[in-house]
Image (cartoon, rainbow, N blue to C red):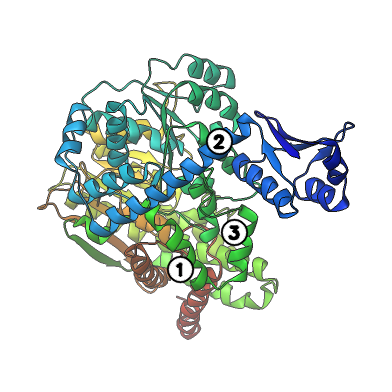
Amino acid sequence: MIKLAWHSGHSITITSSDDDLRALRNPLHSLYLRGSLGGKLAQDGSWEIPQGQMPSKRLLEIDGHFSRYGMHVELDTACLAIIERYKKTKYDFELRLRNGALVKDSQTRLSDTTKEVLKKSLFKRVLSPLQEVSLNHLMAVENGANFSVPGSGKTSIALAYYRYLRELHVVDLLIVIGPASCFAPWEAEYGECVEEERRSIRLAGNTSEIRLEMIAASTPYNMILTTYQSTVRDAEYLIALLSQRKTLLVLDESHYAKKPQGGVIANAVLGIAPFACRRLIMSGTPMPNGLMDLWTQFTFLWPEQRLLGDSEAYLYSLQKKSQNESRKEVAAKVSPLFFRITKHQLGLPPIERKTVDVYLNPLQRRIYDGIAAQYLLRISEAPEDKDLLRQWRKARAIRLMQVAVNPGLLLKESTEFDIDTENNLNASLMDIVRHYRKYELPAKVDAACRLANEILKKEKKIIIWSAFIYNLRLVSELLCEYHPVVISGQVPLRSTDPEEISRESQISRFKADDNCHVLIANPAACAESISLHHHCHSAIYLDRSFNCAHYLQSLDRIHRYGLEREIVTRYYIIKAVDTIDEVIDERLQEKMKLMNDVLEGEFSGIVNGYWSNNLGDEEDLDYQEVETHIQKVGVRYAKNPTT
């Protein structure tokens, strides 16, 4: 007889009667126990088997192996309890899947009884019909995902779920893991949604000793905010906290935990997941690199059930099958567990998009044409290696972007795009660039400031976007009478010193200070978790890059759920005629059309050139269009080289 004994948190011991002791040393069984399970043979003939990440399935696997060879297996009380719990949770899980699919198919809203419980929980915000369905879906699946588009109210839905669970005494604490930029919005939303006083702490940004003290003294708090990076360092302490408090654990921007193998963030969130009473993941972009990104997120939701199986088998399956086949198969598995509100479903008020065409001033035109001509002359020097060629093309495209908006940028290091100052211009051009500001104000900068003055005669606040940090400073100086705030990656997200400028303090000032009328920002620094739709309804784009993600996310800052029907959101695109601006505009419109088709689908997929700075083959198409544009400049330059 084979006997299995459970040692909590340590191993599974396999022993046997004297007759079966020799069988355990049989090469067939020893190879399985050592090779497949990583076991170790003890001197007394017993085996120590690691419990693994799914101990219940490991016990069933061992039982099945020996049973196939006619050997009776006896499990101790602890093993039997684990198996019984697994069978029950498996049944519960299957029930949750059926309930989740039912709510999605029927679009079932909250019952009157549920609304009454929510009201008693002191949740005061009125949810839209779709938000009600999303909340009802969470209640049906218990551990679920909200993949709704930015600006759809995911945080409000999560807070409603937390308050509902708290009223039913299922949980008494909310822990949110996300990028640090989400902290202020969560705190603000809590105040907007809940009548009870918010008692929250931020773990991230403190020393490890202080974080440990905060966790140890967290009993009075109802919400804890931390980052993915801090979670990696604090996993052990968070497990202890989760073991003591009944917690709803939320991964905000859950795609941060995407790496299915070898990722420290993924390992950390999967390690703490089983200790939470309820789990929720939130992201408008759940798979930035493809279907592989979903494994960690859905395994976090139901760690013992492993909806997508083992990570290695899952990744192997994705490689073996076609993209369409994999997509259909994965979508069928995960669909019951996630809910998605699309942009179209939000029913937002209309937008107005106006392109303001600007002609470069004479010196700016001369610099632009000169750099374009140098690009053509040096094409023969382009490296053959694909990655190096892409970097070479990128550097030259950025030079053209800089000159089209502000030639003075050539003298500045572009940390936004990892480009040094320009040192390869001929002496004549370099001399013009050095003294440019003595003679001209860049045409687009002048147009943006004039437009801002006009808008501010009718509206209280506007946003001006630019991809280049030094443009932010220049525009700030020119519009100083409006007491602008400037936000870029160089401004720290937050600060413990109230006198120190941070992104959080700048955003708060823009919202609250009646004397501050202008926010001047880099889209990369304001891409996530910032809502400005109640304070501003017009945005000016001084310049844009080929990064469709930054552009679309910036649009969503002021066009979000909660706008009054009569509010019209206006976007003004400053475009330099006969420059790379025209190429960028065409490419962004193409990407946005593709992206809209994806975002309006239930299972949001991948569009190259949207999700990340790694644009892949899509980037090559961008630069091919740039070279076509430069050929046209070259023809003009050849006809009149003194321009």
Q: Residues within 10 Å of mark 2 (few under 14, many from 20)?
A: some
**Number of numbered markers:** 3
Cα separation, mark 2 vs mark 3, equals 26 Å
Name the amino acid type tagged 1: Lys
Name the amino acid type tagged 2: Gln
The image shows residue 204 at horizontal and vertical percentages of: 50, 28
Query: Earlier along the polypeptide chain: callout 1 or callout 2?
Result: 2
Q: Nearer the viewer, residue 443 or 122?
A: 122
Q: What residue would you read off at disc 2? A: 229
Name the amino acid type tagged 3: Tyr
The image shows residue 292 at horizontal and vertical percentages of: 55, 58
Q: What residue would you read off at disc 1? A: 328
The answer to whether mark 1 and mark 2 are in CB contact below 8 A is no
Q: Residues within 10 Å of mark 3 (few under 14, many from 20)?
A: some
Cα separation, mark 3 vs mark 1, equals 14 Å
The image shows residue 307 at horizontal and vertical percentages of: 50, 52
Q: What residue would you read off at disc 3? A: 314
Against 29, is 403 above or below? Answer: below
Residue sitting at x 57%, y 30%: 235
Task: Look at the numbered disc 3 and give the secondary structure of its residue.
Answer: helix
Query: Earlier along the polypeptide chain: callout 2 or callout 3?
Result: 2
